Amino acid sequence: MIGNRYSHGPLTNLDNGLSGISKPESVRRKISETKKRQYASGEVIHPMLGKKFSKKSILLRVNKMKGMKWNKEQKENLKKIRCKYKNKSQTKYWKVISPNGEEKIVYGLGEFCRNNNLQQSHMFSVAKGHRKHHKKWKCEYYKPD
């Protein structure tokens, strides 16, 4: 350790390095409780909602969570949270055309894709015009009257 001028080291820092201490535990707890209350009431949407993660970070997370067991209450809470945000403004109506030409109007592309063994990201690419079709399915954004 080199040390500062108070510990007879060569550095000339006037500060001993302790002035940058983070907020006290009580303040951090209060902020945390406020945020939790805001997320629960819907005042604020969680900043990580809808974010994409890299494959590396997903693998790290999966490996970390292996061996963790979710109890029934935790599973129910997670289900409630997913249902709460399912009908937010991100969910839209889509016009989907099947391989045999049958047209359907669906609400929420994710659930439709899961039920029909399709990749949601590929269907988004079809809707944006980056792909012509996905497994011969086509889709486009639909704006209801």
Image: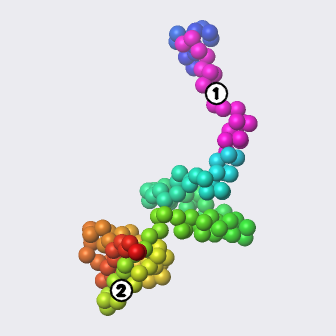
Q: Quadrant of the N terminus?
A: top right
Please, is residue 25 above or below residue 102 in the view? above
Residue 138 x/y as whole percent: 32, 79
Asked if the residue at tag 2 contacts the one at tag 1, i.e. Cβ–Cβ closer than 8 Å, the answer is: no
Locate residue 77 relative to residue 12 in the image: left or right. Answer: right
Mark 1 neighbour density, 10 Å: few (under 14) some (14–19) many (20 or more): few
Q: Position of residue 56 (x, y in %)?
A: 45, 56
Please give the range of residues in magenta.
Answer: 13-32
**In the image, what residue occupies the spot 57% across and 11% down?**
14
Q: Residue at x 48, y 82 (%)?
A: 115
Above or below, 60 against 125 in this view is: above
Q: Residue furthest front?
A: 145
**What residue sits right under mark 1 in the picture?**
21
Please state which of residues 45 and 74 is positioned toward the viewer in this rendering: 45
**Residue at disc 1, secondary structure:** loop
Identify the residue shown where x is 30% and y is 67%. Answer: 128
Q: Split into 4 quadrants, where in the image is the C terminus?
A: bottom left
